[in-house]
Image (cartoon, grey):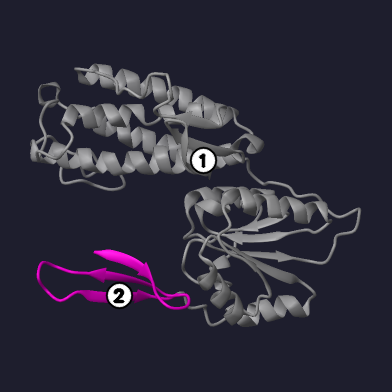
Amino acid sequence: MGASHGEGASSELWFRDGDAAPMRFVFDDPLRMDAVPALKAMAARGIESEMLSGDRAETAKQVAGEAGVVLWRAGADPREKAAHLEALAKEGHRVLMVGDGLNDAAALALAHVSISPGTAVSAASASAVSAAAPARRLFGRRIPRTGVSRPPRAESNGGRRTHTMALSQALLPEFDHEMENTRKTLERVPDGKFSWKPHEKSMEMGRLAIHLAELPGWTEHTLTNDSLDINPPGGPGYKPAELKTRKEVLALFDKNVASARAAIAGASDEDFMKPWTLLNGGTEDFTLPKPAVPRSFVLSHSIHHRAQLGVYLRLNDVPVPSIYGPSADESAF
């Protein structure tokens, strides 16, 4: 299997199964039928539109041309998008930001009004707390696409941007729900099966349970620091906890959940909107807006491994708890 960029805005994927002839899949980013009329309607009202995209230049150029957007930028990372929103605000513009991806979270929070569709990445949805509307009516399906619309320069007495809900309060209900479900699964791990694994390439059940207990610990460090080096030069690298019993696993999990919840509850929107960098031996691996870390590295990561642990339980004839709905062993939600 391999991936490459095709001509224009398309991308392609080649797949080959054994000795069979390879198959080519081409992916395009078509605009919705009402995208151009919507942008023209805004232009008729004197609203200037821009497009900030994390895509490569060929893709962004083609989409901007089809949409009739004159001002566009490609390859924009989260910091560049946020800096552009700040610059527009300093010029006196009141910016409407439309975005649905992780790279949009910081910029969404800086806009005068933010819109994120219901199908957006949760970090972006949590940042767009000033408004909710079907923003994907403006742009196509791919996550990195971002629309920025700015009305004419605001008067000196223009309104102030306000948030209807703090980011911490938007995140906490989901955090509490997922941590409760994760604990229900960890409670089922049998002490005598810590070394069991379904395949030689799989993690042992005990290691998988310990990993789930450790994951909430990322939250406090993320919100109180701007970077983490998992293998710092001249210092000890990351070492997983060595636990032998379910009781120890649950104790570690409860400790990390408590510290994570306190960190989320105590974080301001300004704390959330700072960038966070993962380093390895002093070298940057990537940088994300801080809301993306608890949402993806903690919640989504936990959901993934919790489901994996559920399979381990099933293969050992241990009742699997109900999570989002009934399991084969529990009928209650």
Q: Quadrant of the C terminus?
A: top left
Q: Are marks 2 and 1 in contact (CB under 8 Å)?
A: no
Question: Is label 2 in a helix, a strand or a loop?
Answer: strand
Which of disc 1 and disc 2 is earlier in sequence? 2
Query: What residue is at 58 percent from the left and 81 percent from the top?
Result: 66
Q: Which residues are magenta?
A: 1-28
Quadrant of the rendered image containing residue 175: top left
Q: Is residue 316 left or right of residue 212?
A: left
Q: State the separation of the CA atoms marked 2 and 1.
A: 37 Å
Residue for point 50% across, 59% down = 118
Residue sitting nearer the eye, 7 or 200:
7
Residue appearing at x 91%, y 54% in the figure: 156
Is residue 94 found left or right of 170 in the rendered image?
right
Is 180 covered by the magenta stretch? no
Examine the image and state in which quarter residue 330 appears: top left
Q: Is residue 20 above or below residue 83?
A: below
In which quadrant is the N terminus drawn? bottom left
Amino acid type at circle 2 is Phe
Figure label count: 2
Residue 232 can be seen, yes or no: yes
Position in image of residue 139 (x %, y %): 55, 71
- Three-letter residue code for mark 1: Leu
Residue 171: numbered disc: 1
Instruction: Please give the name of the residue rendered at 23% of the width and 32% of the height, measured from the top-left corner.
Output: 208
Residue 166: x and y in percent read: 63, 40
Say left or right for 98 vs 162: left
What is the x, y in percent for residue 49? 70, 70
Residue at mark 2 = 25
